Amino acid sequence: MKPEELKPEELEVTVDGLMDGLRADLERLAAIPSIAFPGFPPEPVHEAHDLLVGLLRDVGVERVDRIDLPDTAPVIFGEIPPPSPDAPTVLLYSHYDVQPPGDEALWQSPPFEPTPIEGGLRARGIADDKSNVIAHLGMLRAFQGRPPVGIKIVFEGQEEYGSPFDDYPPTDAARFACDAMVIADLGNLRPGTPTLTTGLRGACEVVVEARTLEEPRHSGEFGGAAPDALLALLKALATLHDVHGDVAVEGLRREDWTGTTYTEDEFRSLAGVRDGVPLIGSGSLGERLWSGPAITVIGLDAPSVEGAASAVVPSARAKLNLRFHPQQDPKEAQRRLVEHLRSLKPFGVPLTVTPGDTGPGYEAVTGGPAYRAALAALKEAWGKDAAYVATGGSIPLVNGLAKAAPGAEVLLFGAQDSMCNLHAPNERVLFSELRNTVVAMCAFVREYAAGFEAGGRS
């Protein structure tokens, strides 16, 4: 039997036979501290790059290019031509750089020493996103480098810090042209629940400032009449939410969420909500987290409690992060927040409101042949129907790749899960999720190719 003809039972046997090698390669990759942030040495990033280039060539990817853009780590681009003129092409994305480990005292084992845990491995970046890099390689190995579709491989080296690659793909559209793309930089809602992510909230930032006095003044002599800048700012910030904790800024889009979501107990555990503290907002968790807005005060310039003087505060400012509906225009969402703040004069004090960066959300088109193939593949791998979720985080490169290939279907799934501690201490990946992701990717390209042969493009 040819590799491209692998049926479900043969496919599972094949992938199971690859798992020891995939685990070994994941450990090798996760042991490299490939942190592309300023202040960290660049050599480990290039070491991870070179390791992956070698692994791609070993599996039969003859064309492996290096894309060097200004002020970023190298992007790996590989290509396998379609096996026939009427076969589709699938672009596979993941990234090989990782977050810094943070406070290493909070780790149960050194962050760059992959350590066995029950059912998996612990290390920084082992889930986000090196597990997905290895899942792509596992699919190619299962087909012995000859999958039934054309393949374009994009392994980015500076996704976590941000790079020009987010905007680059549309400037080189021919390179990224494809019929479907699998963006593997996320994963399942929970272990054992196959999950397709269909939406990403957008994001923007706004700084708001109150200035009232030339300098601090004694609170006993002047307090009660002299305008306190911090009180004015806090009064303004309090208008951003209603009594339930829902965002009260007019014009920010909010809709019912009809997909799957967390249970409240799951979410409380994931968020680390203290016992006795309620969640904020109303409606379903999916609506609060994914199809509605959220405003967070992410920074506050004000006198600290430690060493505070008995004085009226002359100035204070806050930095706000707004997350908004995947389909809302980012400039409109930001404008709504800016207009709301500028309309306020708490205690008669004018506010200075400064718009910051914006990033669009994304909502995938569903129902096409690649989407149908992905649903079948996820069910084959996990033995149950896929859940539908969105994510409150932004992945700017999705929009960049989607603009480069505007006709391509975009699929977001992978080997992570919401409980893997990505960006946190003790990040881990489960072998069951990695194994099933490899099976799902193999089944996806098989089903997608078959659908094309049967006229499934429409």
Image: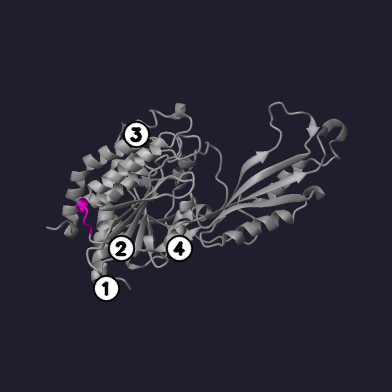
Mark 3 surroundings: few (<14), some (14-19) or many (≥20) residues within 10 A: many
The image quadrant of residue 440 is bottom left
The kind of residue on which mark 2 rests is Thr
Distance from Cα at disc 1 to Cα at disc 2 = 15 Å
3D distance between C-alphas at marks 2 and 4: 16 Å
- Which comes sooner in the sequence, label 2 or label 3? 3
Residue 403 — which label? 4
Marks 1 and 4, how far apart at CA: 25 Å
Look at the numbered discs 2 and 4 and tell me whether their residues touch, using CB distance below 8 Å. no
Q: The residue tagged with tag 1: helix, strand or loop?
A: loop
Q: Which residues are magenta?
A: 142-147
Q: Mark 1: which amino acid?
A: Gly
SS of the residue at dot 4?
helix
| In the rendered image, the vertical position of residue 159 relative to residue 364, given as above or below | above
Does label 4 or label 3 sit earlier along the sequence? 3
| Residue 442 falls left or right of residue 276 | left
Q: Earlier in the sequence, mark 2 or mark 4?
A: 2
Q: Which residue is mark 1?
A: 455
Categorize mark 4 by other alpha carbons within 10 Å: few (<14), some (14-19), many (20+). Answer: some
| Disc 2 target residue | 89
- Within-10-Å neighbours for mark 2: few <14, some 14–19, many 20+: many
Question: Closer to the camera: disc 3 or disc 1?
Answer: 3
